[in-house]
Image: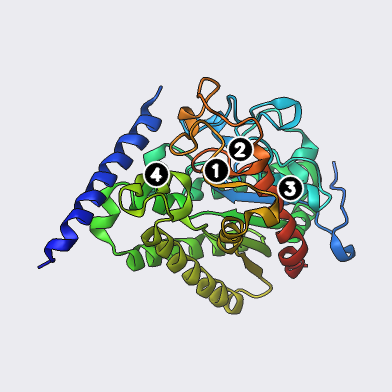
Amino acid sequence: MPSMSHKPVMKLRAESLVLRYVLFSLIITIAQKCDYFLLVGGQTVPAVFMFGDSYGDTGNNDFICTLVVGDFPPYGRDFKDHIATGRLSNGKLMSDYFVEGLGVKEFLPPYLDPKLKAQDLLTGVCFASSGSGLDNLTAHLLEVIPVWKQIEYFKEYKKRIAGLVGEEQATTIIKEAIFFISIGTNDFAANYFLFPIRRLQFTVQEYTDFLLDIYAVYIKELYNLGAFRIALINVPPLGCLPIERTLTSLWNKGACDEEINEAASVFNSGLNAVIDGLKTSLSGLQIVSYDYNKLISEFIANPQKYGLEVVARGCCGTGTIETILLCNKFTPFTCPDASKYLFFDSLHLTQKAYQNISSVFLTTDIPQLL
């Protein structure tokens, strides 16, 4: 039987769950041939592909029926021509910095954009969907594109480029391309710790195992489709997201929530084990995990080192709860200079943060795939 001293905390956590549900419910219901390019060390990467969630989605959600979009200001205000493209940031994402840093092209376009040209396809596209997760329930709750559907789009993509350059050249493009996957955040932040369904079914460890089993299946499927260079971007310290600081502020007093951070750590440790297993079982596979969690933690601990000033709240509005539809051109108190912030809204990073992260990955991690 729990001691009386635990009852206030249990009550506060129950109140936080109610607040989470109300907040997210509000958000949800408001209404040719391939040219090769040089990389570090003289290696070549013909194309880049991105799968996963909002950390990589360059605008696919603009072309589906969902409210998880960023095609309105202040999103995109520091992007080229100040256009809101669907990227949930003030400017570029990791996806864009990856293709730019690899010398492939300036931006990674969304696959669902009907205006894609042949060269856009041949040099890589983005399949990621903001709000998505490994758990199909996650994508269902937010009405976005699940990972299995992203892979179906990739199969369709393969047929399209084979029609452009032939089967042999299409196979070469895919074999020598780099596949980035950023997934898992929403499974915890917008599913497990928000709605009761999975918490009633699984402990954190059990849910992690459930997710990682799915992850391994998807990686094997991509491998069987010709992907040999795969970079997995792990889950950030979820308890340090501004919205999580807000939702747990009654007992954490605005500090990071360590319970949710621990869940992220458990997932990331398991992901490393999955990678080790895949390396031995899939011949020729080059696969690495990028420690996104460590980098974000470093930004929070030493912001000045990275040219940042504000790391506990976002730039948009008060920076504590505003995200997606709650972050719009009418939202008051939005900061004038997002480059000083780690987060643009209460969930998503600024262009400056993505630039810093991508710079590290491009110089220290990506060369492992070449």
Comparing 106 with 266, the one in front is 266
Question: How far, Cα to Cα, is label 4 from label 3?
Answer: 30 Å
Image height check: is 140 above or below 288?
Answer: above
Q: Label 1 belongs to which residue?
A: 348
**Which residue sits at x=70%, y=32%?**
78
Question: How far, Cα to Cα, is label 2 from label 4?
Answer: 20 Å
**Which residue sits at x=67%, y=60%?**
226
Question: How far, Cα to Cα, is label 1 from label 2?
Answer: 6 Å
User: CB of mark 1 within 8 Å of CB of mark 2?
Assistant: yes
Mark number displayed over residue 246: 4
User: CB of mark 4 within 8 Å of CB of mark 3?
Assistant: no
Near mark 3 (Cα within 10 A), the count class, few <14, some 14-19 or many ≥20, is: many
Question: How far, Cα to Cα, is label 1 from label 3?
Answer: 16 Å
Of circles 4 and 1, the one toward us is 4
Q: Label 2 belongs to which residue?
A: 89
Could you tell me which secondary element the residue under label 1 belongs to? Answer: loop
Mark number displayed over residue 97: 3
